[in-house]
Image (tube, helix red, strand yellow):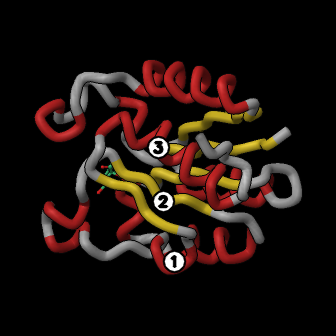
Amino acid sequence: MTKMLILNGPNLNLLGQRQPEIYGTTTLADIEDMCRAKAEALGVTLTFLQSNAEGALIDAIHGARGVENGIILNAGAYTHTSVALMDAIASAELPVVELHLSNIHAREAFRHKSFIAPVAVGQICGFGPAGYPLAIDALMAHLGRLGTP
Ligand code: DQA
């Protein structure tokens, strides 16, 4: 059984209300439901968390070490600032898929820099909530556990 942690950073608890012109009207609870349906279909055990606190995100990454098979991380704005999160991922010895709802490369210049990207397997961004199930597939493919048609 594959175990995955989907970790969501600051302000993502406000999805659906927050800047809907950028992030859409889907709530984080809706996204969690989508992820749970996808995980069930693939036989994945999912832990889905959100925190606004950098330390809590780091603690969750440490807790995943040796427990989960991989992490999907939407670190929100900490993506662009947090050396501490980068170090936590580098220490986790787990594959991490970096995820964003918006296309960070098509937005303000400060969002083009990601401290997560150098320590991630890869990055999915710009597909809105659909990026979450895509990231589950991507992590499964990386783990060699995605069934081929
Ligand atoms: C985000 C992109 C970040 O730049 C931003 O700070 C967020 C959300 C996204 O999912 O598009 O909070 O990670």
**In the displayed structure, would residue 36 be above or below residue 60?**
above
x and y percent of residue 54 in the render? 54, 57
x and y percent of residue 95 in the render? 67, 64
Q: Classify residue 7 by image quadrant.
A: top right
Q: Give the total number of marks visible in the rendering.
A: 3
**In the displayed structure, would residue 137 be above or below residue 133?**
below
In this picture, residue 69 sits left or right of residue 146: right
Residue 134 is tagged as: 3
**Which amino acid does the dot numbered 3 rest on?**
Leu
Q: Earlier in the sequence, mark 2 or mark 1?
A: 1
**Which amino acid does the dot numbered 1 rest on?**
Val
**Which amino acid does the dot numbered 2 rest on?**
Glu
Q: Nearer the viewer, residue 83 or 94?
A: 94
Q: Classify residue 91 by image quadrant.
A: bottom right
Q: Earlier in the sequence, mark 3 or mark 1?
A: 1
The CA distance from mark 3 to mark 1 is 26 Å
Residue that carries the numbered disc 1 in the rendered image: 83
Residue 98 is tagged as: 2
Q: Residues within 10 Å of mark 2 (few under 14, many from 20)?
A: many
The residue at the point 55 percent across, 53 percent down is: 138
* Mark 2 in CB contact with mark 1 (< 8 angstroms): no
Residue 59 seen by the camera: no
Please tell me whether mark 3 or mark 2 is closer to you in this view.
3
Residue 32 seen by the camera: yes
Q: Residue furthest front?
A: 149
Label 1's element?
A: helix
Label 3's element?
A: helix
The residue at the point 82 percent across, 60 percent down is: 65
Q: Classify residue 17 by image quadrant.
A: top left
